[in-house]
Image (cartoon, helix red, strand yellow):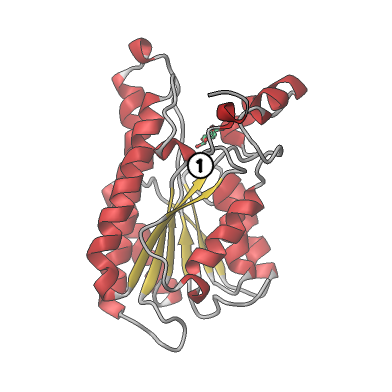
Amino acid sequence: MPIVLEGQPALVTGANSGIGRAVALALGRAGADVVVNYVSDPEAAEAVAAEIRGFGRRAIALRADVSDEQEVETMFAEAIKVFGTLHVVVCNAGLQRDAPFHQMTLDQWHTVIGVNLTGQFLCARSAVREFVRRGVDEKVSTAASKIIHMSSVHEMIPWAGHANYAASKGGVEMLMKSLAQEVAPLRIRVNAIAPGAIRTPINTAAWQTPDAYADLMKLVPYKRIGEPADIGQAAVWLASDASDYVTGISLFVDGGMTLFPGFASGG
Ligand code: BGC
């Protein structure tokens, strides 16, 4: 992997497992020093940080619940103290609390919106404050900085039984676009990655058994599940100057899940 992110410290939320872990590792391999955020399982976060240090980069694990304003602000202050500044922030932490709509509790609603949407707002806000303070550093990047929101195919595909999750990701899309529009003149690029079905703990039930996997493949024209590294690669591209003229997009990394696969043989 080309060393395109040297001198650009990055912070990835929810980086102790799944997509966040793969993104943190990919950014580290691409030359970034990395803050590995987690909320539980410090050993897993420390292991990710240790792996990144193995690439010759600096890495620290910092605990913060992204839905908590004070914890987010404390984490950013600590990250900036350790690395001097941040150039790449990946708002990734996310969760599901699935339920049929009539049984969905307010707590399930609030938990998902709190982490997936409010959490992305709080982290992006702290990021923008630091990026505005520092501005462009032409030695490391043409842009003043880059924010990557982790969205989902469910920012556009409705998802029965997951109304809280789909609503949070629909919200992420317009948060991302509105912010991108607002800060583009400051040379801050804001984009999203919209993953399809990726092999992570959040959706184990969808891929673990051969029957579940076969069912899942009906929704994936490319006929393989996504791997976390597929998202890591996309994040490196969006974080690097290779995508310098790209802002305000959702990059779908989904094996064609958003191509209405049912219409391949119907309609
Ligand atoms: C969800 C997964 C799901 C995938 C495709 C993701 O955003 O978190 O549970 O498998 O979308 O439906």
| Nearer to the camera, 181 or 43 | 181
| Nearer to the camera, 3 or 85 | 3
**Does mark 1's beta carbon lie closer than 8 Å to ligand 1?**
no
Q: Which residue is outermost to the bottom?
A: 139
Q: Which residue is outermost to the right?
A: 210
* Residue in the image at 53% along x and 33% along y: 260
Q: Which residue is outermost to the front?
A: 267
The answer to whether any part of residue 46 appears in the image is: no
The answer to whether any part of residue 33 appears in the image is: yes
Residue 182 on image: x %, y %: 22, 63
Q: In which quarter of the image is residue 58?
A: bottom right
Amino acid of disc 1: Ser
* Residue in the image at 37% along x and 59% along y: 75
Rate crowding at label 1 as few (under 14), some (14 to 19) or many (20 or more) other CA atoms within 10 Å: few
Q: In what element is the residue under mark 1?
A: loop
Eyeballing the image, is 82 above or below 228? below
Q: Which residue is outermost to the left?
A: 182
* Residue in the image at 33% along x and 26% along y: 109
Tally of numbered tags:
1
Image quarter where the N terminus lies is bottom right
Eyeballing the image, is 27 above or below 177? below
In the picture of the structure, the residue carrying the numbered disc 1 is 40
Eyeballing the image, is 101 above or below 173? above
From the viewer's perspective, is 66 left or right of 185?
right
Residue 225 on image: x %, y %: 68, 39
| Nearer to the camera, 155 or 18 | 155
| Nearer to the camera, 109 or 216 | 216
From the viewer's perspective, is 124 left or right of 21?
left
Residue 208 on image: x %, y %: 71, 27
